[in-house]
Image (cartoon, grey):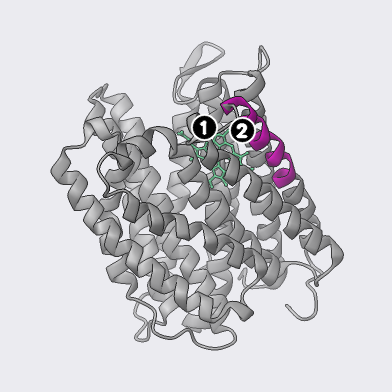
């Protein structure tokens, strides 16, 4: 059974390795947006697909590692036998997407005499390993009479992951059926992208934070995970292009989004009360959620949603995926499986926070550039140089997880 410390430490390392590769590609793209992609290195939007799909692999592997490691304490049973192979398969197919999407994105690639949609195939295979994870999780937890808060958050996170995966699976189906309808294409794209980000990732990350805190003392009075998940469901519509969404659907999604913002604010407050027990990187990540709460309020002002969807989409995505989720997951992986506190760990943490903070600010200011005494290009250049520090921090963090079989005594 893979319920030993070295197994999880190894997978924490591999999750970070994926972050390091996908982050390097992201940094390459950032420079590409300023100086152009060098000839022969591929097309920007294909490389963006390679970057974003591989990055989802980082978050999902980090979460799987943290969830599997903690689950036995809740269930009192050993992990199902397939976990070891499921983790290896998720790792391989997450990484494969980097190479598969790079040449032609979702288009076809010629290999010898055959033409194959390599990106769609690799994404489909990675998605199948997510279903495998969901099935194993269901087997590991079924029939449990007592459901502690972390488990309830993971249960509902997995429901949302299931629905988001259906959206991801629709891409090859729409391609095969040659469906070109813009509304349907955007609907399924955002069912995947937004439910994965504000649904699965948020609930599952709340779950691993709660599990970490519960190790010391219970976290009291958390809002219901079911209510949070159900209100999150319609909010994916807000990711769609404003000219495709009828206004009544916008108001339904916005109203649900306001309830979500209120519930998230309560979670934030509960975590704030336990701030002394949280790793610095988790506290830093929680700042990203303030943007989610603020934007839910601002969005109902007429015109703000349409403006923000055009100019701040990449900022918002990286607020949720990089500042919030990735910082929190990195902090928890280091706290749970990393080496003892050292100067190296503190350099890594500050380098990450500095890089992410500056890139976050540059992307935000990019939305307001016409009122600023700075050019859009200078802000893009600042974001590009900041990304170098983020990637350097991740490569440095890898050292905190080796050698695999020597877990610091206080964490064994
Ligand atoms: C080292 C940190 C990162 C850098 C330098 C970076 C860079 C970039 C760049 C340059 C783009 C294209 C922007 C554009 O088209 O204007 C992009 C898009 C994207 N990135 Fe990142 N990124 C980073 C971290 C992440 C993380 C951690 C995730 C997810 C966990 C992520 C997910 C995405 C997504 C979903 C898109 C948009 C894809 C689309 O438009 O379809 N990125 N990133």
Q: Is residue 401 visible?
A: yes
Above or below, 354 against 208 in this view is above
Dot 2 or dot 1, earlier in sequence: 1
Q: Quadrant of the N terminus?
A: bottom right
Above or below, 346 against 411 in this view is above
Q: Nearer the viewer, residue 281 or 122?
A: 281
User: In the figure, is residue 378 to the left or right of 313?
Assistant: right
Q: Position of residue 251 (x, y in %)?
A: 19, 49
The residue labelled by disc 1 is 369
Q: Nearer the viewer, residue 34 or 145?
A: 34
380 is within the stretch colored magenta: yes
165 is within the stretch colored magenta: no
- Secondary element under disc 2, as helix, strand or loop, is helix
Q: Position of residue 285 (x, y in %)?
A: 57, 60
| Range covered by the magenta-colored residues | 376-391
* Image quadrant assignment for residue 250: top left
- Residue found farthest to the bottom: 217
Near mark 1 (Cα within 10 A), the count class, few <14, some 14-19 or many ≥20, is some
Q: Residue at x 34, y 37 (%)?
A: 189
Q: Nearer the viewer, residue 40 or 123?
A: 40
The residue labelled by disc 2 is 379
Q: Nearer the viewer, residue 109 or 347?
A: 347
Q: Quadrant of the C terminus?
A: bottom right
């Amino acid at each position: 059974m893979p319920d030993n410390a070295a197994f999880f430490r190894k997978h924490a390392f591999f999750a970070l390795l994926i972050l390091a590769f996908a982050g390097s590609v992201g940094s390459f793209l950032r420079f590409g947006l300023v100086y152009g992609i060098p000839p022969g290195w591929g097309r920007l939007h294909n490389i963006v697909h390679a970057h974003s799909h591989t990055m989802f692999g980082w978050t999902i592997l980090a979460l799987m590692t943290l969830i599997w490691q903690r689950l036995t304490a809740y269930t009192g049973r050993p992990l199902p036998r397939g976990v070891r192979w499921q983790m290896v398969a998720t790792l391989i197919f997450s990484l494969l997407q980097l190479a598969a999407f790079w040449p032609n994105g979702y288009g076809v690639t010629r290999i010898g005499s055959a033409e194959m949609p390599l990106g769609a195939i690799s994404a489909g295979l990675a998605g199948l390993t997510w279903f495998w994870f969901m099935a194993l999780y269901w087997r590991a937890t079924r029939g449990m009479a007592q459901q502690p808060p972390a488990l309830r958050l993971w249960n509902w996170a997995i429901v949302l992951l299931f629905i988001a995966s259906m959206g991801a699976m629709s891409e090859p189906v729409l391609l095969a059926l040659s469906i070109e309808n813009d509304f349907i294409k955007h609907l399924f794209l955002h069912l995947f992208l937004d439910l994965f980000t504000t649904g699965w990732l948020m609930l599952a990350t709340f779950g691993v934070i709660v599990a970490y805190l519960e190790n010391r003392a219970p976290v009291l009075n958390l809002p219901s995970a079911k209510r949070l998940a159900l209100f999150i469901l319609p909010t994916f519509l807000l990711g769609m292009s404003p000219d495709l969404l009828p206004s009544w659907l916008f108001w339904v999604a916005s109203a649900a989004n306001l309830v979500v913002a209120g519930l998230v604010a309560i979670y934030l407050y509960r975590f704030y009360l336990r701030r002394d027990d949280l790793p610095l990187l988790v506290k830093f990540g929680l700042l990203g959620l303030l943007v989610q709460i603020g934007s839910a309020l601002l969005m109902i002002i007429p015109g703000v949603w349409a403006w923000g969807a055009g100019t701040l989409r990449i900022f918002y995505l990286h607020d949720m995926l990089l500042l919030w989720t990735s910082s929190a997951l990195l902090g928890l992986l280091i706290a749970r499986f990393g080496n003892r506190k050292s100067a190296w760990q503190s350099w890594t943490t500050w380098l990450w926070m500095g890089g992410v903070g500056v890139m976050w600010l540059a992307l935000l200011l990019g939305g307001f550039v016409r009122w600023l005494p700075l050019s859009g290009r200078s802000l893009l250049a600042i974001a590009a140089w900041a990304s170098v520090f983020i990637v350097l921090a991740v490569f440095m963090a890898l050292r905190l997880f080796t050698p695999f079989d020597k877990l610091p005594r206080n964490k064994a």
